[in-house]
């Protein structure tokens, strides 16, 4: 599904560069990819980080599992192929946000390493920050805020990650949050500390916003401003 089918398409150049947008926002765009079991705390921590960023005057957004499945990915289910396509589309959307200077926080179980690695690979180095929300299955199941584990154990939800479908832990995530050992406020603070420490929350020194140039420079008009070329009739009724 990820192959480009269209022909006769070309990339359009941006009129405002990413560096210009980031200078304006005073931050660096990035994808902060939360991955972990259901109920591990991805949405909870992502929302806290979003709030903390907002309070710091930084521009961010949260792409969250179920919300996306109501809209963009409403045609997809939970088979391995559909999970793969789900994560591929989210990765592309998150990349667009990052390129616009936004810090995109994504909260998806994203159980397969290959899917996450592919999303890392489509981004520039440093643009993809993998956050492993590491919480023991027993703790997730004990929380079960939406009763999903109970349903899965009762056989009412097929292909449920951790119960009847696999979860592949990240091998080299940028951040590990042990949410069965620390509270969500501490986890969010650790993500903020990472972003701050690595320079995502300021413009790189030396970036300036240059003046706006015309998109398609035109040759100078004949005559002065407001003058008609000799012999031309005044226009009327256009
Ligand atoms: N340390 C913690 N970090 C995050 N959440 C915690 C923590 N301790 C308890 N919780 C609770 O665990 C639940 C985590 O649910 P949340 O919806 O954030 O998980 P999720 O990983 O987004 O799951 P899903 O994949 O099903 O969307 C919440 O009810 C939250 O209040
Ligand atoms: Mg969630």
Image (spheres, grey):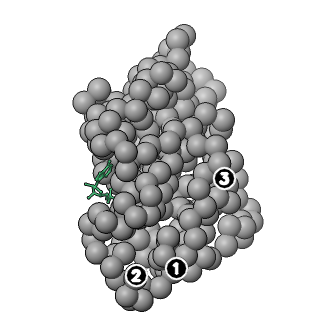
x, y percent for residue 32: 48, 43
Identify the residue shown where x is 55% and y is 44%: 130
Label whose residue precedes the other's in the sequence (2 or 1):
2
Q: Which residue is mark 2?
A: 152
Identify the residue shown where x is 40% and y is 64%: 138
Q: Is residue 144 visible?
A: yes
Tell me, yes or no, whether the two marked residues, 2 and 1, touch with CB atoms within 8 Å.
yes
Q: Secondary structure at mark 1?
A: loop
Looking at the rendered image, the disc whose residue lies closer to the viewer, 2 or 3, is 2
Q: Which residue is mark 1?
A: 164
Identify the residue shown where x is 43% and y is 54%: 135
Q: Which mark is residue 117?
A: 3
x, y percent for residue 37: 45, 62
Give the total of numbered labels: 3
Q: Nearer the viewer, residue 150 or 38?
A: 150
Query: Please, which residue is most extreme toward the top here?
Result: 206
Ligand 1 near label 1 (Cβ, under 8 Å)?
no
x, y percent for residue 194: 47, 29
Please state, as top left, top right, bottom left or bottom right, where the N terminus lies in the image.
Answer: bottom right
Label whose residue precedes the other's in the sequence (2 or 3):
3
């Amino acid at each position: 599904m990820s192959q480009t089918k269209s022909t006769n398409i070309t990339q359009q150049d941006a009129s405002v560069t990413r560096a210009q947008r980031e200078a304006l926002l005073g931050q660096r765009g990035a994808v902060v990819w939360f991955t972990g079991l259901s109920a591990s705390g991805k949405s909870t921590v992502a929302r806290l980080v979003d709030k903390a960023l907002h309070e710091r005057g930084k521009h961010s957004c949260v792409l969250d599992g179920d919300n996306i499945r109501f809209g963009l990915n409403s045609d997809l289910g939970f088979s391995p192929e559909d999970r793969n396509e789900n994560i591929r589309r989210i990765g592309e959307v998150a990349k667009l946000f990052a390129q616009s200077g936004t810090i995109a926080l994504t909260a998806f179980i994203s159980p397969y390493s290959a899917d996450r690695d592919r999303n890392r690979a489509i981004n520039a180095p440093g643009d993809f920050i993998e956050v492993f929300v590491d919480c023991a299955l027993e703790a997730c199941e004990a929380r079960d805020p939406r009763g999903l584990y109970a349903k899965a154990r009762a056989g009412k939800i097929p292909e449920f990650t951790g119960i009847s479908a696999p979860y592949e832990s990240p091998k080299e995530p940028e951040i590990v949050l042990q949410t069965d050992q620390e509270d969500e406020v501490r986890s969010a603070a650790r993500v903020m500390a990472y972003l701050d420490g690595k320079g995502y929350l300021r413009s790189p020194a030396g970036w300036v916003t240059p003046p706006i140039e015309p998109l398609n420079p035109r040759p100078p008009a004949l005559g002065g401003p407001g003058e008609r070329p000799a012999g031309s009739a005044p226009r009327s009724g256009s």
